[in-house]
Image (cartoon, helix red, strand yellow):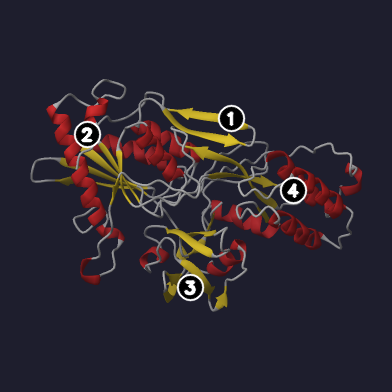
């Protein structure tokens, strides 16, 4: 899971399921049934610190999808017996054992949140967050804190923080061995105060001072770029797959269709993910038929989501992606390419294809646990691999000046210009033939790529 400064879904301890992907993240807030195991009686662990420890153990035992090869069911049962035989002075002692137990899985996305950390997550979902606006992850290979993406328009974005920056220090405190939860606590703070991040970018070390602010995100920006040849290019930038993204996208497409857009460039660069249902709804606005995404648990494929014939436009489409395009962005990108609905331009995506469930525990603490991985319509496993675009393109900085959000989708944006050029070729091909119709005989010709 990518622990972010922002979680957009309301979290309540009710028996419901909220599917949420933040860099493919499913929040499944459900009541946790107790497994009947003979090694320790239930009465022995009720109303003491062992109760939460056993809840965590049972969730892993029942639902965990092992992506690292470190999970062995016999060893896991042995761990339970050993830990429940120990004595704990209080909850904090039990929490230490829980974290040690989970560390044996070697899965940075399966993590325990104590009541304070879990409450902070709920505060974040309510929109009360003061921070700098970055998503960060713990690299499972080198145990370093890595920036997934700065959120467009936030202090981190404006300060020049980039995807794949390694956070070496926070206000002078080294991050080696530091948990994501502690890092987030250090980065967050009162509005107007500053935090200094020590950043390793390639071989260069930078100190970046960032002023904290309220993080507010509009999901969709758009414009209609008119060209000398009379074509109107609909540029749509999707920054987050939050609860409002699908509605905003629908309104944007309808507005651009009304204004006679000739085709579309959908910009997912730096988009770290969001709601699963939002990504599916948005995919359906572009794709009329075909599979969008499937999820695979340790028991096999258990959920396949498909288009439903509700696409809002059939005009040519190019999708912009980069290293900061993760999870839900990769779901949408994979669905568009695998269904031959459009082509991808930019850089290889981040590669986050594991699904986590967030569980509320009996004492107010919480657990994120890897329960599945997602596959593109053609069955591609993106985790750690990412998606290589059809056309690779770099961002070229103009005379050494820093590229900023206002340059996106303009003639200053070298990746956008490549995407626009590819789109115009598609539009011109289409003019020579009939209108693009998913599933019809002209589909292959309409999307034929010769550059």
Which residue occupies 78% across, 59% down? 97
Q: Which residue is mark 4?
A: 56
Gap between marks 4 and 2, in whole Å? 52 Å
How packed is label 4: few (under 14 Cα within 10 Å), some, or many (20 or more)?
Answer: many
Q: State which mark lies toward you, 2 or 3.
A: 3
CA gap, disc 2 to disc 3?
45 Å
Disc 2 designates what residue? Answer: 258
Helix, strand or loop at label 4? It is helix
Q: Which residue is mark 1?
A: 302
Q: Measured along the vertical axis of the image, is residue 388 above or below residue 317? A: below
Mark found first going from the N terminus, 4 or 1: 4
Q: Residue at x 23, y 33 (%)?
A: 448
Reading the chain from its start, which is encountered first: label 4 or label 2?
Answer: 4
Upstream in sequence: badge 1 or badge 3 = 3
Quadrant position of the C terminus in the picture: top left
- Residue receiving disc 3: 197
């Amino acid at each position: 899971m990518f622990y972010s400064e922002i979680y957009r879904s309301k979290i309540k301890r009710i028996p419901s399921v909220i599917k949420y992907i933040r860099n493919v993240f499913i929040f499944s807030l459900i009541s946790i049934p107790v497994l009947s195991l003979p090694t320790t009686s239930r009465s022995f662990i009720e109303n003491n610190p062992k109760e939460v420890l056993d809840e965590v153990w049972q969730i892993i035992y029942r639902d965990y999808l092992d992506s690292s090869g470190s999970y062995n069911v016999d060893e896991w049962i042995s761990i339970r017996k050993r830990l429940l035989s120990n004595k704990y002075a209080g909850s904090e002692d039990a929490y230490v054992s829980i974290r040690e137990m989970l560390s044996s899985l070697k899965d940075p996305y399966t993590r325990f949140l104590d009541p304070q950390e879990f409450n902070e997550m709920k505060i974040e979902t309510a929109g009360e967050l003061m921070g700098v606006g970055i998503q960060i992850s713990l690299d499972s290979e080198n145990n370093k804190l890595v920036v997934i993406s700065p959120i467009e328009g936030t202090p981190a974005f404006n300060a020049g923080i980039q995807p794949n920056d390694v956070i070496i220090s926070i206000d002078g405190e080294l991050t080696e061995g530091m948990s994501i939860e502690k890092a987030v606590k250090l980065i967050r703070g009162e509005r107007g105060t500053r935090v200094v991040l020590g950043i390793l970018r390639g071989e260069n070390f930078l100190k970046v001072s960032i002023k904290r602010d309220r993080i507010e995100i509009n999901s969709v920006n758009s414009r209609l770029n008119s060209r000398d040849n009379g074509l109107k290019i609909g540029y749509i930038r999707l920054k987050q797959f939050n609860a409002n993204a699908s509605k905003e996208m629908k309104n944007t497409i309808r507005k651009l269709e009304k204004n006679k857009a000739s085709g579309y460039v959908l910009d997912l660069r730096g988009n770290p993910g969001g709601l699963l249902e939002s990504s599916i709804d948005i995919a359906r606005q572009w794709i009329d038929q075909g599979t969008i995404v499937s999820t695979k648990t340790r028991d096999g494929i258990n959920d396949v989501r498909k288009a439903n014939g509700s696409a809002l436009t059939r005009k040519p489409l190019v999708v912009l992606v980069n290293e900061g395009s993760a999870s839900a962005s990769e779901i949408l990108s994979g669905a568009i390419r695998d269904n031959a609905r459009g082509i991808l331009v930019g850089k290889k995506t981040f590669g986050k294809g594991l699904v986590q469930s967030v569980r509320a525990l009996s004492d107010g603490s919480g657990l994120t646990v890897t329960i599945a991985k997602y596959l593109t319509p053609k069955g591609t496993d993106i985790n750690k691999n990412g998606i290589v675009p059809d056309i690779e393109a770099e961002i070229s900085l103009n005379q050494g000046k820093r590229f900023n959000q206002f340059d996106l989708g303009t003639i200053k944006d070298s990746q956008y210009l490549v995407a626009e050029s590819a789109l115009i070729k598609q539009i011109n091909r289409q003019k020579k033939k009939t209108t693009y119709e998913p599933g019809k005989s002209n589909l292959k010709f309409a999307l034929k790529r010769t550059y």
